[in-house]
Protein backbone atom coordinates (compact mmCIF):
# COMPACT_ATOMS: atom_id res chain seq x y z
CA UNK A 1 0.00 0.00 0.00
CA UNK A 2 0.99 3.63 -0.45
CA UNK A 3 0.89 6.15 2.39
CA UNK A 4 1.49 9.86 2.76
CA UNK A 5 3.34 11.38 5.73
CA UNK A 6 2.81 15.05 6.58
CA UNK A 7 5.86 16.48 8.35
CA UNK A 8 9.48 15.39 8.28
CA UNK A 9 10.39 16.38 11.82
CA UNK A 10 11.15 14.06 14.75
CA UNK A 11 8.05 11.88 14.33
CA UNK A 12 7.67 12.05 10.52
CA UNK A 13 11.33 11.17 9.92
CA UNK A 14 11.18 8.26 12.35
CA UNK A 15 8.03 6.99 10.61
CA UNK A 16 9.52 7.36 7.13
CA UNK A 17 12.69 5.49 8.11
CA UNK A 18 10.76 2.68 9.87
CA UNK A 19 8.48 2.21 6.86
CA UNK A 20 11.55 1.34 4.76
CA UNK A 21 11.52 -2.07 6.50
CA UNK A 22 7.76 -2.68 6.18
CA UNK A 23 7.09 -4.87 3.12
CA UNK A 24 3.37 -3.96 3.14
CA UNK A 25 4.19 -0.35 2.27
CA UNK A 26 5.56 0.30 -1.20
CA UNK A 27 5.71 4.11 -1.30
CA UNK A 28 5.82 6.86 1.31
CA UNK A 29 4.83 10.21 -0.15
CA UNK A 30 6.16 12.96 2.09
CA UNK A 31 5.24 16.60 2.29
CA UNK A 32 6.52 19.37 4.54
CA UNK A 33 6.49 23.15 4.32
CA UNK A 34 10.27 22.79 4.35
CA UNK A 35 11.06 21.26 0.98
CA UNK A 36 14.73 21.01 1.92
CA UNK A 37 14.00 18.73 4.86
CA UNK A 38 11.74 16.49 2.76
CA UNK A 39 14.08 16.18 -0.21
CA UNK A 40 17.01 15.40 2.11
CA UNK A 41 15.02 12.54 3.64
CA UNK A 42 14.14 11.33 0.14
CA UNK A 43 17.86 11.14 -0.71
CA UNK A 44 18.53 8.85 2.26
CA UNK A 45 15.58 6.46 1.79
CA UNK A 46 14.30 4.16 -0.97
CA UNK A 47 10.53 4.50 -0.61
CA UNK A 48 10.18 8.22 0.17
CA UNK A 49 8.94 10.54 -2.59
CA UNK A 50 8.69 14.26 -1.82
CA UNK A 51 5.44 15.86 -3.01
CA UNK A 52 4.66 19.59 -2.73
CA UNK A 53 0.89 18.91 -2.67
CA UNK A 54 -0.97 15.79 -1.50
CA UNK A 55 -4.12 16.32 -3.62
CA UNK A 56 -2.84 14.55 -6.77
CA UNK A 57 -1.90 11.39 -4.81
CA UNK A 58 -5.05 11.12 -2.66
CA UNK A 59 -6.76 8.67 -5.08
CA UNK A 60 -3.89 6.17 -4.78
CA UNK A 61 -3.06 6.29 -1.06
CA UNK A 62 -4.53 4.25 1.78
CA UNK A 63 -3.41 6.37 4.72
CA UNK A 64 -2.41 9.95 5.52
CA UNK A 65 -0.20 10.14 8.62
CA UNK A 66 -0.14 13.69 10.05
CA UNK A 67 3.00 14.38 12.12
CA UNK A 68 3.47 18.11 11.67
CA UNK A 69 1.42 20.62 13.71
CA UNK A 70 -2.11 21.59 14.65
CA UNK A 71 -2.20 23.96 11.67
CA UNK A 72 -1.27 21.09 9.39
CA UNK A 73 -3.94 18.88 10.98
CA UNK A 74 -6.58 21.59 10.41
CA UNK A 75 -5.71 21.67 6.71
CA UNK A 76 -4.80 18.08 5.83
CA UNK A 77 -7.23 16.07 7.99
CA UNK A 78 -10.43 17.39 6.29
CA UNK A 79 -8.68 17.14 2.90
CA UNK A 80 -7.83 13.46 3.38
CA UNK A 81 -11.14 12.50 4.99
CA UNK A 82 -13.11 14.26 2.22
CA UNK A 83 -11.34 11.97 -0.25
CA UNK A 84 -12.30 8.95 1.89
CA UNK A 85 -8.69 8.34 2.96
CA UNK A 86 -7.98 6.98 6.46
CA UNK A 87 -6.06 9.48 8.58
CA UNK A 88 -3.66 9.02 11.49
CA UNK A 89 -3.27 12.13 13.64
CA UNK A 90 -0.36 12.95 15.97
CA UNK A 91 -1.27 16.62 16.64
CA UNK A 92 -4.14 15.41 18.83
CA UNK A 93 -4.38 18.75 20.61
CA UNK A 94 -6.30 20.01 17.58
CA UNK A 95 -9.35 18.17 19.00
CA UNK A 96 -9.61 20.56 21.94
CA UNK A 97 -11.49 22.67 19.36
CA UNK A 98 -14.93 21.10 19.77
CA UNK A 99 -16.13 22.29 16.38
CA UNK A 100 -13.12 20.75 14.62
CA UNK A 101 -13.68 17.48 16.46
CA UNK A 102 -17.38 17.31 15.57
CA UNK A 103 -16.74 18.21 11.92
CA UNK A 104 -13.86 15.75 11.51
CA UNK A 105 -15.70 12.84 13.16
CA UNK A 106 -18.82 13.53 11.06
CA UNK A 107 -16.83 13.83 7.85
CA UNK A 108 -15.05 10.51 8.53
CA UNK A 109 -18.39 8.79 9.04
CA UNK A 110 -19.93 10.32 5.92
CA UNK A 111 -16.98 9.38 3.74
CA UNK A 112 -16.39 5.93 5.28
CA UNK A 113 -12.86 6.90 6.32
CA UNK A 114 -11.21 6.07 9.64
CA UNK A 115 -9.44 8.40 12.07
CA UNK A 116 -6.55 6.76 13.96
CA UNK A 117 -5.17 8.43 17.09
CA UNK A 118 -2.07 6.60 18.34
CA UNK A 119 -1.48 6.35 22.10
CA UNK A 120 1.42 8.79 21.62
CA UNK A 121 3.64 9.63 24.57
CA UNK A 122 1.59 7.72 27.17
CA UNK A 123 0.72 4.14 28.08
CA UNK A 124 -2.68 2.86 29.21
CA UNK A 125 -4.89 4.34 26.47
CA UNK A 126 -6.14 0.87 25.47
CA UNK A 127 -7.30 0.11 29.04
CA UNK A 128 -8.75 3.60 29.51
CA UNK A 129 -10.76 3.28 26.32
CA UNK A 130 -12.15 -0.13 27.35
CA UNK A 131 -12.89 1.03 30.91
CA UNK A 132 -14.77 4.11 29.70
CA UNK A 133 -17.50 1.89 28.20
CA UNK A 134 -18.91 1.43 31.71
CA UNK A 135 -18.38 5.04 32.78
CA UNK A 136 -15.65 6.18 35.12
CA UNK A 137 -15.63 8.02 38.43
CA UNK A 138 -12.26 9.64 37.92
CA UNK A 139 -9.47 10.10 35.37
CA UNK A 140 -6.42 12.07 36.48
CA UNK A 141 -3.11 12.65 34.77
CA UNK A 142 -0.10 13.86 36.75
CA UNK A 143 2.64 15.10 34.46
CA UNK A 144 6.05 15.71 36.05
CA UNK A 145 8.74 17.54 34.09
CA UNK A 146 12.05 19.28 34.79
CA UNK A 147 12.06 23.12 34.78
CA UNK A 148 13.69 23.15 31.31
CA UNK A 149 10.53 21.57 29.85
CA UNK A 150 8.48 24.69 30.60
CA UNK A 151 8.71 27.52 28.13
CA UNK A 152 7.52 31.09 28.74
CA UNK A 153 3.89 30.97 29.84
CA UNK A 154 1.48 33.81 30.69
CA UNK A 155 -0.29 31.40 33.07
CA UNK A 156 2.88 30.65 35.06
CA UNK A 157 3.75 34.36 35.13
CA UNK A 158 0.30 35.21 36.48
CA UNK A 159 0.78 32.65 39.27
CA UNK A 160 4.26 33.97 40.11
CA UNK A 161 6.10 30.80 39.00
CA UNK A 162 9.50 31.05 37.32
CA UNK A 163 10.36 27.40 36.45
CA UNK A 164 14.12 28.07 36.31
CA UNK A 165 13.97 29.23 39.95
CA UNK A 166 12.02 26.22 41.25
CA UNK A 167 14.32 24.23 43.58
CA UNK A 168 11.88 21.65 45.01
CA UNK A 169 9.07 19.52 43.56
CA UNK A 170 6.18 22.00 43.01
CA UNK A 171 2.63 21.58 41.73
CA UNK A 172 2.16 24.38 39.21
CA UNK A 173 -1.28 23.49 37.84
CA UNK A 174 -4.39 21.50 38.72
CA UNK A 175 -7.54 21.74 36.64
CA UNK A 176 -9.55 20.26 33.77
CA UNK A 177 -7.89 18.92 30.62
CA UNK A 178 -9.47 21.77 28.67
CA UNK A 179 -7.86 24.35 30.98
CA UNK A 180 -4.54 22.46 30.89
CA UNK A 181 -4.57 22.43 27.13
CA UNK A 182 -5.18 26.18 27.13
CA UNK A 183 -2.41 27.09 29.57
CA UNK A 184 0.18 24.39 28.70
CA UNK A 185 0.12 23.75 24.97
CA UNK A 186 3.26 21.59 25.31
CA UNK A 187 1.22 19.00 27.27
CA UNK A 188 -1.70 19.28 24.96
CA UNK A 189 -1.38 16.01 23.03
CA UNK A 190 -1.31 13.60 25.96
CA UNK A 191 -4.12 15.45 27.79
CA UNK A 192 -6.18 15.44 24.57
CA UNK A 193 -5.59 11.73 23.88
CA UNK A 194 -6.68 10.79 27.41
CA UNK A 195 -9.75 13.01 27.17
CA UNK A 196 -10.80 11.46 23.85
CA UNK A 197 -10.22 7.89 25.07
CA UNK A 198 -11.89 8.42 28.44
CA UNK A 199 -14.40 10.88 29.83
CA UNK A 200 -13.79 14.07 27.85
CA UNK A 201 -11.95 17.36 28.24
CA UNK A 202 -14.10 18.73 31.11
CA UNK A 203 -14.06 15.74 33.48
CA UNK A 204 -10.44 14.65 32.94
CA UNK A 205 -8.27 16.32 35.58
CA UNK A 206 -4.65 17.29 34.99
CA UNK A 207 -1.95 17.99 37.58
CA UNK A 208 1.33 19.48 36.36
CA UNK A 209 4.40 19.25 38.56
CA UNK A 210 7.77 20.92 38.04
CA UNK A 211 10.57 18.86 39.62
CA UNK A 212 14.26 19.83 39.28
CA UNK A 213 15.28 16.24 40.25
CA UNK A 214 13.68 14.48 37.25
CA UNK A 215 15.38 13.90 33.90
CA UNK A 216 12.43 12.36 32.04
CA UNK A 217 8.91 13.57 31.23
CA UNK A 218 6.76 11.43 33.49
CA UNK A 219 3.04 10.81 32.99
CA UNK A 220 1.07 9.10 35.76
CA UNK A 221 -2.41 8.14 34.56
CA UNK A 222 -4.94 7.15 37.23
CA UNK A 223 -8.49 6.06 36.59
CA UNK A 224 -11.26 4.57 38.73
CA UNK A 225 -14.54 3.05 37.66
CA UNK A 226 -16.68 -0.07 37.56
CA UNK A 227 -13.74 -1.92 35.98
CA UNK A 228 -11.55 -1.31 39.04
CA UNK A 229 -8.51 0.96 39.16
CA UNK A 230 -5.79 1.85 36.68
CA UNK A 231 -2.41 3.34 37.55
CA UNK A 232 0.06 3.65 34.67
CA UNK A 233 3.38 5.49 34.85
CA UNK A 234 5.28 6.36 31.66
CA UNK A 235 8.78 7.86 31.97
CA UNK A 236 9.68 9.22 28.57
CA UNK A 237 13.11 9.83 27.13
CA UNK A 238 13.25 12.62 24.56
CA UNK A 239 13.32 11.80 20.86
CA UNK A 240 16.91 11.74 19.52
CA UNK A 241 15.72 14.13 16.76
CA UNK A 242 13.66 16.61 18.83
CA UNK A 243 14.10 16.90 22.63
CA UNK A 244 10.60 18.40 22.94
CA UNK A 245 9.04 15.19 21.60
CA UNK A 246 9.07 11.91 23.53
CA UNK A 247 10.59 9.04 21.59
CA UNK A 248 7.62 6.85 22.54
CA UNK A 249 5.30 9.15 20.55
CA UNK A 250 7.15 8.36 17.31
CA UNK A 251 7.25 4.65 18.17
CA UNK A 252 3.49 4.66 18.82
CA UNK A 253 2.89 6.07 15.33
CA UNK A 254 5.02 3.33 13.77
CA UNK A 255 3.24 0.68 15.84
CA UNK A 256 -0.13 2.05 14.66
CA UNK A 257 0.95 1.96 10.99
CA UNK A 258 2.09 -1.66 11.43
CA UNK A 259 -1.33 -2.56 12.82
CA UNK A 260 -3.17 -0.69 10.06
CA UNK A 261 -1.10 -2.22 7.25
CA UNK A 262 -0.78 -5.70 8.78
CA UNK A 263 -3.19 -8.51 9.72
CA UNK A 264 -2.71 -8.76 13.47
CA UNK A 265 -3.67 -6.17 16.06
CA UNK A 266 -2.60 -6.88 19.63
CA UNK A 267 -4.22 -4.52 22.14
CA UNK A 268 -7.15 -3.68 19.85
N1 LIG B 1 0.39 12.47 20.31
C1 LIG B 1 1.46 12.67 21.07
O1 LIG B 1 1.60 12.11 22.17
C2 LIG B 1 2.53 13.59 20.58
C3 LIG B 1 3.79 13.61 21.18
C4 LIG B 1 4.77 14.46 20.68
C5 LIG B 1 4.47 15.32 19.64
N2 LIG B 1 3.22 15.31 19.10
C6 LIG B 1 2.84 16.23 18.01
O2 LIG B 1 3.21 15.67 16.76
C7 LIG B 1 3.50 16.73 15.85
C8 LIG B 1 4.90 16.49 15.23
O3 LIG B 1 5.86 16.45 16.26
P1 LIG B 1 7.43 16.49 15.91
O4 LIG B 1 8.15 16.37 17.20
O5 LIG B 1 7.73 15.55 14.80
O6 LIG B 1 7.56 18.00 15.39
P2 LIG B 1 8.83 18.67 14.66
O7 LIG B 1 8.78 20.10 15.01
O8 LIG B 1 10.07 17.90 14.90
O9 LIG B 1 8.47 18.51 13.08
C9 LIG B 1 7.31 19.03 12.52
C10 LIG B 1 7.52 19.11 11.00
O10 LIG B 1 6.27 19.43 10.40
C11 LIG B 1 6.43 20.51 9.49
N3 LIG B 1 5.20 21.30 9.46
C12 LIG B 1 4.64 21.96 10.51
N4 LIG B 1 3.51 22.55 10.13
C13 LIG B 1 3.33 22.25 8.82
C14 LIG B 1 2.34 22.57 7.86
N5 LIG B 1 1.28 23.35 8.19
N6 LIG B 1 2.46 22.08 6.61
C15 LIG B 1 3.53 21.31 6.27
N7 LIG B 1 4.51 20.97 7.15
C16 LIG B 1 4.41 21.44 8.40
C17 LIG B 1 7.64 21.31 10.00
O11 LIG B 1 8.27 22.00 8.94
C18 LIG B 1 8.51 20.20 10.59
O12 LIG B 1 9.42 19.67 9.63
C19 LIG B 1 3.42 18.04 16.65
O13 LIG B 1 2.17 18.66 16.44
C20 LIG B 1 3.54 17.58 18.10
O14 LIG B 1 2.87 18.45 19.01
C21 LIG B 1 2.27 14.46 19.53
Image (spheres, rainbow, N blue to C red):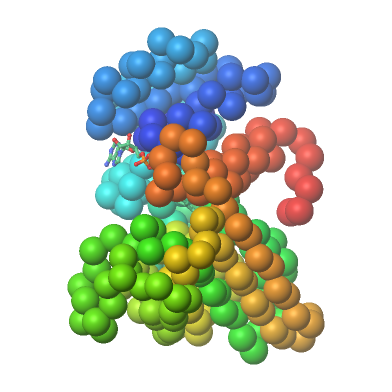
Label tally: 0
Q: Residue 177, how many percent across, how many down?
A: 44, 76
- Is 46 positioned to the left or the right of 40 in the image? right
Comparing 231 with 56, the one in front is 231
Which residue is drawn at the image coordinates 49% and 14% (left, top)?
45
Q: Residue furthest bottom?
A: 137
- Is 262 positioned to the left or the right of 67 in the image? right
Quadrant location of ligand 1? top left
Q: Is residue 166 visible?
A: yes
Which residue is drawn at the image coordinates 61% and 86% (left, top)?
138
State whether residue 268 is above or below residue 99.
above
Q: Residue 159, how many percent across, how many down?
A: 26, 83
Q: Report which quarter residue 233 is drawn in.
A: bottom right
Which residue is drawn at the image coordinates 33% and 47% (left, top)?
69
State whether residue 108 is above or below residue 211.
above
Which residue is drawn at the image coordinates 44% and 80% (left, top)?
171
Looking at the rendering, in which quadrant would you find the C terminus? Answer: bottom right
State whether residue 182 is above or below residue 228.
above
Q: Residue 77, how many percent across, how many down?
A: 38, 47
Comparing 189 with 165, the one in front is 165
Looking at the rendering, in which quadrant would you find the N terminus? Answer: top right
Amino acid sequence: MKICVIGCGAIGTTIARAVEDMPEIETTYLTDRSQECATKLQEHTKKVRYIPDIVPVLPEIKLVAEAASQDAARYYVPLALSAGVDTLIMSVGVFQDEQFQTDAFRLAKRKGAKIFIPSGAIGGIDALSAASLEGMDEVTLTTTKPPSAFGPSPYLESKGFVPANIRVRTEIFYGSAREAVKHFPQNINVAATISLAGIGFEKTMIRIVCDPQVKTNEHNLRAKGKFGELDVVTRNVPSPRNPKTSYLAALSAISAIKKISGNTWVGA
